[in-house]
Amino acid sequence: MEINGNSNDVLHIVMFPFFAFGHISPFVQLSNKLSFHGVKVSFFTASGNASRVKSMLNSAPTTCIVPLTLPQVEGLPPGAESTAELTPITAELLKVALDQMQPQIKSLLSNLKPHFVLFDFAQDWLPKMADELGIKSVYYSVFVALSTAFLTCPARVPQPKNYPSLEDMKKPPPGFPHTSVTSVKTFEAQDFLYIFKSFHGGPTVYDRVLSGLKGCSAILAKTCSQMEGPYIEYVKSQFKKPVFLVGPVVPDPPSGELEERWGNWLNKFESGTVIYSSFGSETFLTDDQIKELALGLEETGLPFFLVLNFPANIDVSAELNRVLPKGFMERVKERGIIHSGWVQQQHILAHSSVGCYVCHAGFSSVIEALVNDCQVVMLPQKGDQFLNAKLVSGDMKAGVEVNRRDEDGYFGKQDIKEAVEMVMMEVDKEPGKLFRENQKKWKEFLLNKDIQCKFIEDLVYEMKDMVKISSN
């Protein structure tokens, strides 16, 4: 059944995330919330990702997947259709493929005639296309507002193409609000410089983001004023257009049971004593980082469940034998698990024995920890994760960041041990006491169904209102 895009009784939205599951997941979570509120969703993704996306989407009669055909791009392996299957260098070619897909996207949008298309950072050409077709474009930022405010606002590059230096990137841009974020470390600023690099002659990430944010009808941010008020106001003042807030998009509780072998192992330990540690499926720690992290967890004396992932085609057991300190597995065999590959993360965090989550500070992971009574210890690895960690530890005061060396981000086992002890053992001392109190406060806020539901209701209302105004 085709719903006419110009009919105002059913809101029709096209979702179009970048081909990376760190981006696809927030678009899926939002789709699920919107379809519950009667919104028709057409989800654009590469055909190779369609079955995985289908398993993540709630089955609703108003939701459908629209598979896209990726063009052949020299250097891009056939069939590789998400960053998960590629190295960071070859993943850049997905942006080249995306740029070549404009005629395909235009044809699909012309036929579907949605009211809105929600798009991602890489499709800087989409607002103009949507505008020509009479469709509203909404830039959906899957990053916290602090990330947009610090990295990708016009004040960061006042003169076109006159990109900032390493020293510039350590400081916030002009007019930035007065918050706990006053500077970043050298190694973090070095990582941020990536957004000003051009690959394969294409636009830089900064230029793509700025074009998208400046060209769109409205900005949608995966955040709320309770967490990020000052940064949201700064973004509004920088772009001078509507900024809708969808809230932190708390994931639905997981279905099914935790795998028996993990449940049995966790059941051996007292409530709130186990450390769970994971860094996402596409983050690979260096040899030094693995060694210091493992030794740091061992030195806490607490039981731990450490998930380490490696690039494809690596012999995991040989790699662990090579990297882990001699005798380590033998010493921790009664209270430590080291696993590689997928695990039921939400189930594990929800288990009563788990009391601490050492992670890369991906914002969805932080939210999962807070709603599950886990203390958060953050060891960010790249990009927005560094700013997420500053928001959570500095502004929200709901978790601790592992201390790192300024020039290269090095951390030792003692840094891991101290961070974990602060929130797990020094519970009557500051700042550990404050972090634990705030974790409870944020958990209450995030699990308040009325508050979280209102974010979505308000968004649907604002979008319907926007369409109605434009069609008068």
Image: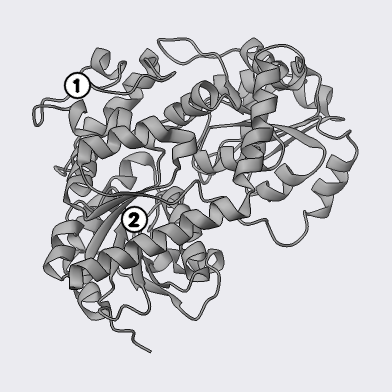
Left/right of residue 392 with respect to residue 145 in the rendered view: right
Residue 383 location in percent, x, y? 39, 32
Give the Cα separation between the discs numbered 2 and 1. Answer: 34 Å
Q: Name the residue under label 1.
A: 164
Whether 231 is drawn above or below 103: the answer is above
Q: Can residue 31 be seen in this view?
A: yes
Residue placed most toward the observer, 59 or 250: 250
Q: Is residue 324 visible?
A: no
Residue 119 location in percent, x, y? 30, 56
Quadrant containing the C terminus in the rendered view: bottom left
Whether 352 is drawn above or below 195: the answer is below
Residue 201 location in percent, x, y? 14, 42
Disc nearer the start of the sequence (2/1): 2
Instruction: Please tell me which residue is depicted at 19% across the width and 28% down the height of the picture.
Output: 155
Question: What residue type is disc 1 on?
Answer: Pro
Q: Name the residue under label 2.
A: 77
Badge 1 marks a residue whose secondary structure is loop
Whether 202 is drawn above or below 301: the answer is below
Mark 1: give few (<14), some (14-19) or many (20+) Cα within 10 Å.
some
Question: What residue type is disc 2 on?
Answer: Pro
Left/right of residue 284 with respect to residue 140 in the rendered view: right
Whether 421 is drawn above or below 194: the answer is above
